[in-house]
Structure formats: structure tokens, C-alpha cells
Image (cartoon, rainbow, N blue to C red):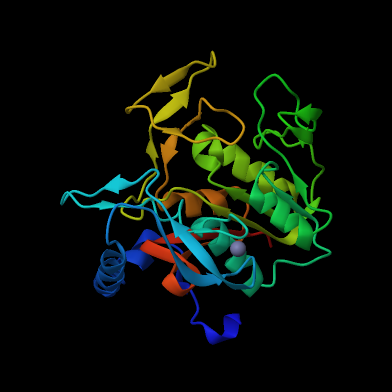
Amino acid sequence: MARFLPSIWLGEFRSKAEYDAQGQALAAAFSVYDWIDDRLLHSRHPFSYPAYCVACAQVTPIQVGWVLALGNEDGSVHPAWTETGICSRCQLNSRMRALLDLLQTRCLLQKTSRAYIAEQTTPLYRKLKQWIPSLIGSEYLGPGYPSGTLLSSWQGFASVRHEDLTALSFPDRAFDLAMTLDVFEHIPDYRKAFAELWRVLASGGSLVFTIPFFPELETTRIRASVDKTGKVIHHLPMELHGNPVDPAGSLCFQNFGWDILAALREVGFADAVAHLYWGPWQGHLGYPFFVFQAAKA
Ligand SMILES: [Zn+2]
């Protein structure tokens, strides 16, 4: 089925300079995409339309809603596209399915892979577990637990593993594939998390992740940090994101810019790439967005 549809992968970039060099061409393409969105948005009511779901491997109704809708400078309002575009069958949203597309097209989704994902209570974890039976998932349950702690019957889940990405319990080179989706922005010392994930990956392994990313930023904008006493210092107004395991939400410590590719290389990754995605035929609308891949030599 997928072979009858155009690719949703638009290109890859290794720096802001590389991205900016395509500025005019990208701006022109994005104006096409924006026009298509506007034609779809008859009203502010939720709607669904048929598109191919890479997780279900079939055309399904893709639901578009207005939760977390964003206002633009010109006064227009658009859905939070990467958070919506939810497959009504498997419940995976746009960014989750784009990450799956990257895994599939790069042959990273292997049944025998040793894989880790920094989530365990989500539809994506359950879907991936069908393909990679030995997949290990975890949640961050707070500073009170050591990494590797297994909590039984936790909030309706039979067993949940706690891991702190800056101090993982796994041995060196334990995995071929590591994945995180919109997690790094909640970790003040995200460079330490990058280093830990590099440590637990085997030679040739890949870290694949999504983050809220700001392609206009060369340098990551630090919104909050943690001082030596553990106190959170706010440099910009607080930004809270939804958290599947904490109704109070999670504080966003930084808005990522292109320097994270350099940060990934600095901790040891041989290559770090931002893959650009868009394609209504697979339920990806709105501003094109990125899925990241860092490879260990
Ligand atoms: Zn689906």
C-alpha cells in the first residue's frame, strides 16, 4: 500500500546553515502546504479525513482536533499539527507515525533488535512491542526512585519501569535502537541524557527522537535551569506540557535549536541528522516538522 503513496520524507539537514541555504525553496514549498491546510479547515470543529497510517499499514480515518491550537502573528489559528492528526485505529499522532516512517524506511525496525523507548504507558509503546517483542520501555516517575526500579500495579498498569535518562540503569552497548518522543525538552541536563543514550547504544546503533524544535534558532533557548541546590530557576515564562504519568504536566526547560546536532556529536555520535517531514496522504499536515537521528559509529 505505502508504495502507491509519495514519500513523506522531504529531506535531511545537518546544520542551520544547510537548512537556511534552502530558505527560499522551503518558504515557497511551505506556502503550498499552508494553502492546503487552510482549504481543509472549514471550521474550528474537529474533523477526520482518510490517510495512510504507517502503523496500521492501511488507510484509516485520521482525526484532526484543536487541542493545543496555536495562534500565528497574523491572527490565524492552526491545530497543533504534530500533536493531532491521530489515527482513529491505533491512536498514534502525526509525530509518532513520522518516527515510525523513519524507522521503517531506514530498516531500523527489526524484530530481533535490542530496543529501548523512554515511554511505557502509551499506544506507541504497545504498537512497537508487537514488532519488537524484547522492547524495553520506561517512564520517569520522579526523583525518589533509582533507575531500573519496577513498580507493580502502578496507576492501572501491571508493571512500570522507572528510568532517569541522565543516569540509565542499563549496561554499556545494551541496545541497537533507542527512542524518545518529546522528552529531552523536560531534562535540564539534556547533554548528559545524550551521553547516557550514546553509552547504552551498541556500535552502529541509532538514537531516534522527536522534540519541539525551532528551526529559526541556531542556539537552544534555555527557559529554565536547575541550580546546585536543585532549585529550578526560570529565565522565561513557564511552559508546561502534558505528561501521561503526571496530571500536573512537565516543565519545558528549553526550546531546541540547531546546536543540538553539534551537542549530539560532542557526546560521541558519529552523525546527527534532522529529517524533515510532511505529507497529508499520511496524515501529516501543517508546518513541516523534524524527526532526529543520531548514529553511533
Ligand atoms: Zn493507525
Q: Quadrant of residue 206?
A: bottom right
Q: Locate residue 31 relative to residue 163 in the image: left or right.
A: left
Q: Is residue 152 visible?
A: yes
Relative depth, front residue between 235 and 155 = 155
Q: Quadrant of residue 103?
A: bottom right
Task: List x then y, in percent, for residue 259.
Answer: 43, 50
Q: Residue furthest left?
A: 74
Q: Locate residue 191 relative to residue 127 in the image: left or right.
A: left
Q: Residue at 51% x, 82% y: name it.
A: 5
Quadrant location of the C terminus in the rendered image: bottom right
User: How many numbered discs?
Assistant: 0
Q: Residue at 71% x, 29% y: name it.
A: 155
Q: Residue at 72% x, 52% y: name it.
A: 126
Q: Residue at 42% x, 46% y: name it.
A: 256
Reply above or below: 219 against 131.
above
Q: Locate residue 103 relative to residue 236 in the image: left or right.
A: right
Which quarter holds ligand 1? bottom right
Task: List x then y, in percent, for residue 187.
Answer: 54, 34
Quadrant location of the N terminus in the rendered image: bottom right
Q: Residue furthest bottom?
A: 4
Task: List x then y, in percent, for residue 141.
Answer: 67, 28
